[in-house]
Image (cartoon, rainbow, N blue to C red):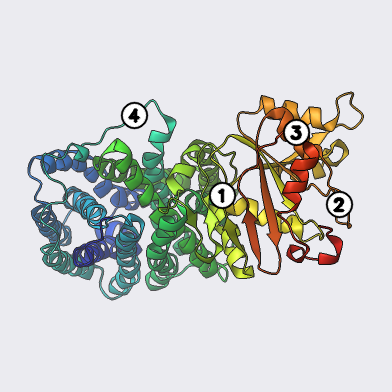
Amino acid sequence: MPRSNSPALGAIALATFLTLVPITLLVPGLTELVVDAHGGTRFHAHLFVSTNQLAGIIAVPFAMVLHRRWPRTRRWVVGLLLLDAVAFLGMGAADTLNGLFAWRALDGVAHLPAVTFLMIAANRSGGERRGASLGLVAAALMVGVGVGAPLGGLLIDRDPSLVYPAGAALLVLAAAAGAAVPASAAPASDPSARYRWDRRRAAAWMPLAYGFADRFLIGVFVSTFTIFLTEVHGVGAATRGMLMSLFLLPFALLCWPAGKVADRIGWFAPLIVANVTFGLVYALYGVLPMALLPWAMVASGVLSALMFAPSLVLVSDFARRGAGEGLFGSFQVAGSFGFLAGPLVGGMLVEVLRDGQGAPAWALIFAGVGLSLSLFGIVSWTILRPLARTDTLPKSPDRIGGSANVPVITPNVASRGNAFTQRVCITLMRLTGWKFTGENFPDLRKFVVIVAPHTSNWDFPLGVMAKFSVGIRGTFLGKDTLFRFPLGILMRWLGGFPVDRTSKSDVVTQTVELVQRADRVIIALSPEGTRKATPRWRSGFWWIAHKAQIPIVPVAFDFPNRAVHIFPPFTTSGDPDADIAALRKLYRPEMAFDPAKYIA
């Protein structure tokens, strides 16, 4: 397994941090730098944020093509960062609004390709655990953003012109750190450097969609939100910078842990859950009182980390699957379109959406943008879900979950849930001391699982926890009356199958028909049929397995040892009494929660 190049990652992270600080130095002072210094309007202030993104959109594809021809990544990083320093000095010296925007465009031409090459270098240097390496670089990126905002606010309050030489100096230091970046992130002959996009597949759009959506939201935030704070809450630049840091610093500090989480459970669950939740929090910005806004900023930062780092892992995974590392450049371009569109859309919404007094309808603006992000998360869940299982399969071919020792099922086995529900249930197993022992589940599409001893109500929650830990879809039988609204929603979600005991077909026949119709199915039954002591097992499970010609997998809940024990598959012989007697010998009364209720 390739190991990460830690010294290289350190240099990349430092260069990334120093590159991003100058970008947000300017954000708290949009009014002072654009409106007050050069006579611009609020729309010009929004446009100032977008100009370097527009220039970067144009520059990145050309830079990627040139990089494939001259793949000296170190030289590209150093040269582009020095060029960016010159652009900052030019912005400080500009004496007209047009001149300011020209230098701002040069800033975009240099900045976005430099960040793209740093990200590619991190992906190459990260080894197998790319979530952690990309999370580290994302953390450095966001720490830079988080430090830049309050620092910029302090500089703006003292003298707005100070931000330009300060930014140039930081970019020179970033170039010095970039001198330690590995010389080449991708050999010129490596065909994977070229991005190959299958536009016919909806899933292929998702890395680009996430790049766009996430930074669209941030684009609205860093432009419209700062103006909202000024006009509605009347706070100064320093306070605006500190409020933004409450969002950006948790975002920055948690990117690396979020990347490690993505390494362990995959990118799917944290990406979707954080996306939907962040949109809901964002939608409340316009109605929250000032006292609650700091808490909303912290929550937004935490959720953004859980969204951003996994989105980089999503890009890396698509690149590994054949899209090529050029996807990182396309991801940056899509993100730049988002960051370009965010301030522009925010500016237009501020000008168009007005309340009865003629002021911007801030509550409606933030609610519309936030709920749109949540809806996007729901839509992307339906598109990316089929990829989640292959993306989150553990590296071990046999077991996962540490002390829980959870068996890994093959794609043939009926499955349900996702990496998030699996990780939650595995964690519950570890906290309660439960583990799996015995065999793995067979590599079969159809089989019957019998669970014994069944002597307590605790068997059901234990079974649910074990089922979701493995990720199997176990179908249990229940009276059709239990499946009426609203209980039926829960019963079907848990895997229940309603049986009609008044039907001419008996329960066994109905279940066999279900097995025959299904492509993959696991019938889960308790052969005792009751929690009370019973000297005989019911034979329905045997007849289902025998008539459907599928094996039986015996499972024991061993409470004293806190073990879910899986026995080898059992094939029926045609003699139900002999087979059931052989199966009963596998279980002992001392396994039960209440041994007095189990008769061997």
User: At 15% across and 57% down in the image, what residue appears?
Assistant: 84
Which one is earlier in the sequence, the residue at label 3 or at label 1? Answer: 1
Residue that label 2 marks: 530
Q: Which mark is residue 544?
A: 3
Q: Which residue is mark 1?
A: 367
Give above or below for 55 relative to 230.
Answer: above
Q: Residues within 10 Å of mark 4 (few under 14, many from 20)?
A: few
User: Whole-Å distance between the Cαs marked 1 and 2?
Assistant: 52 Å
Does residue 287 show up? Answer: no
Q: Is residue 377 left or right of residue 493?
A: left
Q: Secondary structure at mark 2?
A: loop
Q: Amino acid at mark 3?
A: Ile
Circle 2 residues within 10 Å: few <14, some 14–19, many ≥20: some
The quadrant of the image that shows the C terminus is bottom right
Foreground label between 1 and 2: 2
Please name the amino acid that badge 2 sits on: Thr
The residue positioned 84% from the left and 58% from the top of the image is 599
Image coordinates for residue 570, horizontal then vertical, percent: 65, 42
Q: Earlier in the sequence, mark 3 or mark 2?
A: 2
Instruction: Identify residue for label 4.
Output: 198
Q: Does residue 298 lie above or below 504 as drawn?
A: below
Task: Using the rendered image of the protein, determine whether residue 143 is visible from the camera's viewpoint.
Answer: yes
Q: Is residue 279 left or right of residue 146?
A: right
